[in-house]
Amino acid sequence: MTMTQTRRRFLTMTALAGAAGLLSPERVRAAESALETTSVRLGRFSAICFAPQYVCEALLRADGFTDVRYIDTTAVTSEEDLGRGKFDFQSNLPMDHVIAIDRGLPITVLTGLHAGCYELFAHEGIRGIADLKGKRVGEGGSRWLSLIAAYVGLDPKKDLTLVDVIGANPLDLFAEGKLDAYMAAPPDVQELHARKVGHVILRTATDPPWSQYFCCMTAANREYAARYPVATKRVIRAVLKAADLCASKPEVAARLIVDGGFTERYEYALQTLTENPYGAWREYDAEDTLRFYALRMHELGMIKSTPQKIIANGTDWRFLNEVKRELKA
């Protein structure tokens, strides 16, 4: 990204955030302790739904961070990269965080981000989840389809042929009929709709029980959160204010994502921000989300730890609670 683009993004975000009242009030900043570090690194990969993490840069800088960096990662390696300190914060699916905590990776889940961004596409003849029995179904390694299948009484190990599409082109596989169904995230969701391939049989933003829990959550490297609690709180505050921005000004947030090089298609970014509930962090229960998913994963043998142990070993809600009180959320 050029210096001109960077400056434009910063000025746009700062002006908008100031006008919307999203920057920290002077009285709040004055009452806070000084930052222990002015550096923060956030992971990045091609997932539009992590938008708040991608548009919070100016908010972070306005709150005292002078060194804000985005570090490239992948859906496969992001939890490992976060745990080993390649970067300090990363958003991901609750299931991925749960698996990482169960493995003993040093991460701490701090807040929910938003609810619902996945859609399950299927070809003709498949009208519901039960119809997936005996079908080839593609997913990106999140194990979400296993939970969905089990919820309606299917045995995911026996009744489904789960095809891990990481590293492949799932859009083409699905379009060519090599997959009977595909669990897609943005921007694949928007691309499939644009190409008019298949039809949607489940949307996590609207179909319970999945719509009642966070779809994506933000976690920190455990050492960073422990060493820099003031910085950690300000990062969470910036991310959640950015979530409010995505909800209230989706067209501007979408432009920032494109200008920042996080995705290429403005219309896909705008559709994602418009359709997904980014204000859900004020209403949904982050701990309940992890408990919900961890319980089902434990029942299916996907993790060894109990939900209670997952929550005890891998979460810290103090920062979220402080931000909620401060923002009257």
Image: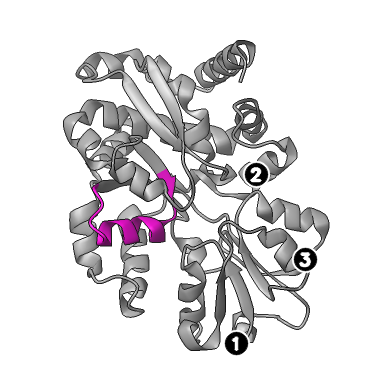
In the rendered image, residue 185, in percent from the top left (x then y), is placed at 60, 55
Q: Quadrant of the N terminus?
A: top right
Residue 59 in view: yes
Closest to the observer: 312 or 324? Answer: 312
- Image mark for residue 133: 1
Residue identified by numbered label 3: 175
Closest to the observer: 284 or 317? Answer: 317
Q: Residue at x 69, y 76 (%)?
A: 180
User: Mark 2 or mark 1: which is in front?
Assistant: 1
Q: Quadrant of the C terminus?
A: top left
Q: Which residues are magenta?
A: 91-106
Q: Is residue 253 above or below residue 297?
A: above
As measured in the structure, the alpha-carbon distance from the residue carrying label 3 to the one carrying label 2 is 26 Å
Residue type at mark 2? Thr
In the rendered image, residue 18, in percent from the top left (x then y), is placed at 50, 17
Q: Residue at x 22, y 56 (%)?
A: 104
